[in-house]
Structure formats: structure tokens, C-alpha cells
Amino acid sequence: MFKTKKSKIILFSSLGVVALALVGGGLLFGGKKTEAPVAAEGLMYTTVKEGSIASSTLLSGTVAAADEQYVYYDISKGDLNAVLVAQGDQVQVGTPLVQYDTAELQAAYDTAVRARDKVGRQIEDLRVNGQSVDLTGDATVDGKATSAAQRTVDMQMQDLNDAYADAQAAVDKAQAAFDEATVTSNVAGTVVEVNKSVSKSNTSTNQTVVHIVNQGSLQVTGELSEYDLANISADQEVNITSKVYPDKVWTGKISYVSNYPENGQAATALPGSGGGASNSKYPFKVAITSEIGELKQGFSVNIEVVNNSKNILVPVTAVVPEGDKNFVWTIVDGKAQKVEVTLGSSDAMYQEVTGGLKADDHVISNPNDSLQDGKEVEAHEETTHQADQHQ
């Protein structure tokens, strides 16, 4: 009997617990239903501002002259007669540099001048002396003869004028060839190279005779990979450093970026790359905007392309990717709002948003699955945001 009573008490106690749970549930779920704001523990938001991602692209290049001239041996002009400058000379635009042999050119010019002058004398003789006509005394006959003679004179004069024009063109051509025998400087600068040992037997088309450099107009040249090409454009500011002077920094600006590979090289798939592309290189130039100082032509330098663009910045944790789209959660009038955004660059902490948000929007920096579009939400504002670090 004792055992039976004990089992009844245990059973009764268990039922009592169930009953209390049911009563508690009735109190919890009974009556008018109210919707509480989502208040996930630790939910934070930030007031977004404009700023720049503290990132940069690193390139390498070589200091080169922005204004220079190479004079190559031109076999079509004949023998090289004289080099008129020496290494180290300072020259101006128009300074004679190289003189080719002009003997044949002078003879051709003289021949052209004589041919022109001969036609000129014929024109003068016809103009002064004209053509005589024998008259018969018969007015009708004499009139016809005179008219015929005049037409002949006019035609002869026209032919001579045409011949003179052709002769003058020959003189001009001979004069131009004679003038081209003397090569002049088209830049102001310093003669840095002179080579008198050139030869017709050398088939090379780039035998340098004179090289002139404007030392005050240096630039940096280099090549971009196809990956860097997508991030580099003209007018971007750069910082330039050299291992020779590690404590110095020069400033510059991208002045030129080619859209075509160096020397017309085509993209070629690399073995084992699955058809992917190439190691094509695209030329670029940097104009140096600070004082040249110790920089010298030929120096190898490092180039840091600084990102100074201003965009909306959000914590990287605020971005929610869904397929090929990206979203952030904002708070508008106390309610959560899901916003599709367009992304730019990013670093370890912040993400550029190039579309979808504006300055001073409230963005939830640590969204979670409890958020629902249009539902009230409670979140605490972060005390530090990107504007403090990314101005």
C-alpha cells in the first residue's frame, strides 16, 4: 500500500507541473497580442560619413626625360660630314647638331636654279619682244594674222609660266633637301651623348649620333599589369620614393595610361591557366609635380598611387551579400530597412559604398537574422565610426 501511495503522489506532482506550465502559457499567450521591437543583444548602428579607403597601389618605374631628342644616322642623306656639338654642350631650339655631306645636294640645287632661271629669261624675252607679224595692207587679212599671232603669244606665255612654276617647285625641293642635311635641335637641353663612329655598313636603323636631354623636365615611366590597369587613371596623385634617397618623397600625377599593350603585344594564355590571360604590360607616365632635387635620369623608383576619392564608408561587417547583390540594413524612423548598395574598394575595416546610401544614414554595423524589413528595431549607436579614421 505504501508503494502505491508513493507512485500516486509522484504522478500527481508531475501533473501539477504540467498544469502550471499550461497556466503559465495561457497567461503568456492569452489576451491581446502585441509586437515588440527587435532588440537583439549587441545590435549596433553607425552614422555613415564620406571618407577614403586608406589603400594604395604600388608600382615601379624609371626616371626618364620628358623632353629629349635622339638624332639617328640617316643613310638616305648620304655620308656624315660633321657633328657640330660636343658632349656637355648646352643647346637651344634650332641649334645645328649634325651636318651631312652637301656636295651632291648643292649640285642638285644649282641645277634646279639654272633650269628655273632659263625659263624666266624666256618669259622676259617673250614679254619684251613678243612676236612680229608681217602686214599686207589688207585690213581683213592683217586683222586675222594679228589675232592668230596674239593667241600664239598668249599660249606660249602660259606654257612658260607653267614651266617656271614646275622649275620653282624643283628648286624648293632641292632647297629642302639641302636644309635637311643640317639637323637642328628641337629641344633646349644638354648634349649627353655624341657618337661619330657611325657607318653605312651598319644595318641598324637606330645608330645614335647625338642625344639631347632637358634635365629639368624629368618624368617617370613604367608598365602596368592588366590588373593594375583597372585601378589606375590619368590625374591620380602619386608619391615617388627611391632606394638611393630613402628619406625623401617626391609627388607626382599620372599623366598618361595606355589602353594598348606595349609594342602591340597580345594577351596570351599561360600554360595551365585554363585559358586565362596574360602578362601583357601597358605603358604609363608620371609627371613629377615637386622639385626634381636629387632625382636623376635612369633612377629606379617606387610609385604609390594614393586613393583620394571620397565615398560613403560603412563597416565591412555591415554588408550582407546575397547572390550577386549586396545589401545593408539601415534604420529609418526606428524601423529596419534593407537597402541594396553598390560597392567600391575596401580595407580590413571599411567598405566603400558608391551607390545606395548617403551621408548621415544610420547603418546597422552587425546585422543578424532577427532583422526584418519594415519592423521596428532597437540598436545602440557606436561611439566611434569611420569618419574618425578615414577623412
Image (cartoon, rainbow, N blue to C red):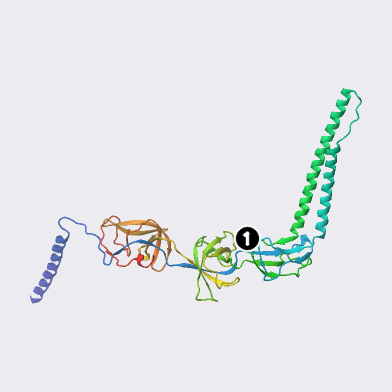
* Image spot of residue 76 (x, y percent): 77, 60
Q: Residue 17 falls in which quadrant of the image? A: bottom left
249 or 156: nearer the eye? 156
73 or 82: nearer the eye? 82
| Left/right of residue 362 with respect to residue 264 in the rendered view | left
Q: Helix, strand, or loop for circle 1? A: helix
Q: What residue is disc 1 on? A: 264
Residue beneath the point at 35% across and 61% down? 49
* Image spot of residue 67 (x, y percent): 61, 63
Image quadrant in which the N terminus is located: bottom left
Q: Residue 97 falls in which quadrant of the image? A: bottom right
Q: Residue furthest left?
A: 1
From this viewpoint, is residue 351 visible? yes
| Left/right of residue 134 with respect to residue 167 in the rendered view | right
Residue beneath the point at 8% across and 76% down? 2
Q: Residue 293 falls in which quadrant of the image? A: bottom right
From this viewpoint, is residue 274 visible? no
Q: What amino acid type is highlighted by mark number 1? A: Gly
| Left/right of residue 53 with respect to residue 181 in the rendered view | left
